[in-house]
Structure formats: C-alpha cells, structure tokens
Amino acid sequence: MSGGRVVPVEWRGDEPILRILDQRRLPHEEVYLEARTAGDVAEAIASLAVRGAPLIGVAAGFGMALAAARSEAPGGAAGILRDLERAAAVLAASRPTAVNLSRAVERVGRAASEASGESADGVRRAAAWEALRIEEQERVSCAAIGRFGASLVPPGASILTHCNTGALATGGEGTAQAVITTAHDDGRQVRVWVDETRPVLQGARLTAWELQRRGVPMTLVADSAAGSLMAQGLVDLVLVGADRIAANGDTANKVGTYQLAVLARHHGIPFFVAAPFSTVDLSTATGSDIVIEARDPDEVVAPLGVPFAPAGTPAFNPAFDVTPAELITAIVTDLGVVPPPYRSSFARLEGRSPSAVAGPARVAAGEERR
C-alpha cells in the first residue's frame, strides 16, 4: 500500500479555518474537522482528534491565529491581545504534558504583542505568520531528526516502536518514525514491530496505517509481546518519541514506554528517544516535575467505545509515563544525536537551530549490546 503525504492540519487563512484530519476516525475513514475558534482547536486536541506533541504545538499556534483573525473585540490591537490571552488559557489547558503546546501559544502571543504598535490587521498578520513559522520549523526539524537518527540504524535492523510518531504526530515526516522512513528510503531494509499502544491503539490505528502507506515492512504486536520478542533476539533497537524531556533527560512519552526501556536494558538492546529540541524543557529539572495527564477511565474499560470490562469497573488511565534518563541510550534531536549526560549536552545545544549544526554526535547502536 502506498499513498501521498499525510496532511494532518491545514491552515486556510483566507477563510479563516484550520482543517484537522480527525485521527479518531482513522484508519477506516479520512474525515476533516473545520476549526473556526481557539476553542474548537482545544477541543480537537483534548479529544485526540489531533495529537502528538509537535503537531499539538502546530495546531495550538494556529488556534491562536484563529483567535486573532476572528477577534471582534473593541479597541483595535489591544482588544485582539485580550482575546489572545483568553485563547491562550483555553489552549494551554487542553493537554498539560506536551511542552510544545505551551511554547507555541507563547510564541504566537509574543509575536502578536510585538506587533501591537501596528494596526489590528498587523496583529492578525503577525499571529498567522508566527503560526506558519512554527509549522515550517517542525517540517525542517523532522527532516533533520530523520537524517541524524538513520545513522544509528544498522542494515536489516528490526525496530520496535510505540504509539505514533509519524506525520500524524508532527506535520512533517515524523520524529521516531522519520528515522524509520529515512532508513527505509536509504535502502537499509529495516523491519518494524509496531506496538498496539493501548488503550487508544495509536500504533494499531495510526502507525500501521502510515507505515503501510510508505511501504515500510511492519508487523503489529500486542504491547505485552515486547519482552518475548526481545528475549528471542527479534528486536535490534527500540525507537520512541517524546512529549516532554526534562533537563536531566528523563522523558515523558505515551504510557507503556517506561516498561519498554526496562525490558531493553535487561536484554542489552539500545533504547533511543527521537524528538525536536523544542520538546526539551530545561525549566523542568527532572521527570518527577512533569505533570502527567490522567484521561477518561472509559478509554480503558471501553476502548474506542467498545465495552470490555464489567459495568462499573474502576479504571486508572494515565496518558504518559516517565522513562529515567539512565535507561536512554541517546536522544535524537533536530540538532544531532545527544549522548548522556543529558544535562550538560542540552546546555551546549541551547539556543542553536537545526541549520547551524553540521552533523550528529555518533552513538553506535551496537554499543549497548552485551
């Protein structure tokens, strides 16, 4: 199966609306929502119609642009800025764990504020331009992550991945998935084990769909099969994304990631995280400081709306878990492959841009093998 490039969000500034591919309906239906307000975008983020830390940031940026474009507040530029403050609060509350969201909201708000000496239309343009810049930077970042990360993938490697880290999560080629598709395009003949990723099944519904469209050989497995695969020598490396990375390298990602890291360490298998440097939050000291979102328990007792547990069964549904830095072999960013110790490595990279980096720090995948 193959297909064209996936476009999960599309800004139409002349209307203005944000078209959002409703990921809740995939892989069976390709349905687009039309968000007209920041509240519409926040609802799409909270309900997982749009998801993935980088793409959440892109969507939130456009949510701010919508608020500016549609503002009818009196007072010209000052009135628009007041509406943007309200929109920022709504968007920031939609999902607390992904740092990209708050950063995108802050960037667009700051760009609009800096243009407040201009006309109201100048403020609107500044908000839209900054949102478009965020989107373009994510595309550039994804391409860089793919290039840097592919250098870590041996020919013929079997890669285990979790959740969804492709275009549906980023708007570009992806983060961890960009590494996979770049290695595939380079002729490295990789194969991918795709975790279902319960309870919402982003791996089964989204990653399988994307990899099949790209022609990458893949096999879907239950999350609980990972340890057995590793024990049989069927996994060469684990490659996952991230929603927030603390200053010390502790990484919050889709729940189930931590146990993969523990299993990988036990079996001597490299465990790589791939994310743009914008996902690194240097203001968060360690993983214990990351707010972990708790989602509706119904996602556990009735996945995708299908009840499995007895009526009234209590359930706990954390959306993410935190993998300690010591279990992570290296972090692939758009600024290069970052080795431990992460705190000092991040400090050296702070303030740099992907275009300023000549090449990755090399970390051989085989180094973690026992």
Image (tube, rainbow, N blue to C red):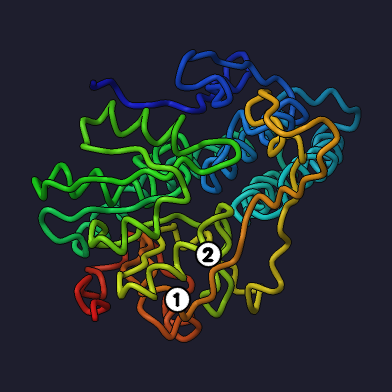
Quarter of the figure with residue 338? bottom left
Comparing 135 with 213, the one in front is 213
Q: Which residue is depicted at the point 46% across and 29% down?
A: 205
Question: Disc 1 marks which amino acid?
Answer: Leu
Looking at the picture, how far across and down is residue 330, in whole percent?
Answer: 36, 72
Q: Dot 2 lies on which element?
A: helix
Name the quadrant of the N terminus: top left
Q: Which residue is labeled 1 in the image?
A: 327
Q: Is residue 77 above or below residue 227?
A: above
Looking at the picture, how far across and down is residue 192, in whole percent?
Answer: 27, 45
Comparing 262 with 122, the one in front is 262
Of callouts 2 and 1, the N-terminal one: 2
Q: Residue furthest front?
A: 310
Q: Is residue 44 above or below residue 316?
A: above
Quarter of the figure with residue 289? bottom right
Residue 49, numbered label: none
Badge 2 vs badge 1, beta-carbon distance below 8 Å: yes
Looking at the picture, how far across and down is residue 59, in whole percent?
Answer: 59, 36
Comparing 326 with 18, the one in front is 326
Q: Dot 1 lies on which element?
A: helix
Q: Which residue is depicted at the point 69% across and 39% down?
A: 300
Quarter of the figure with residue 15? top right
Answer with left or right where residue 86 lies relative to residue 191. right
User: Alpha-carbon distance for marks 2 and 1?
Assistant: 9 Å
Q: Callout 2: few (<14), some (14-19), or many (20+) C-alpha neighbours within 10 Å?
A: some
Question: Disc 2 marks which amino acid?
Answer: Tyr
Q: Callout 1: few (<14), some (14-19), or many (20+) C-alpha neighbours within 10 Å?
A: many
Q: Which residue is depicted at the point 17% across and 48% down?
A: 190
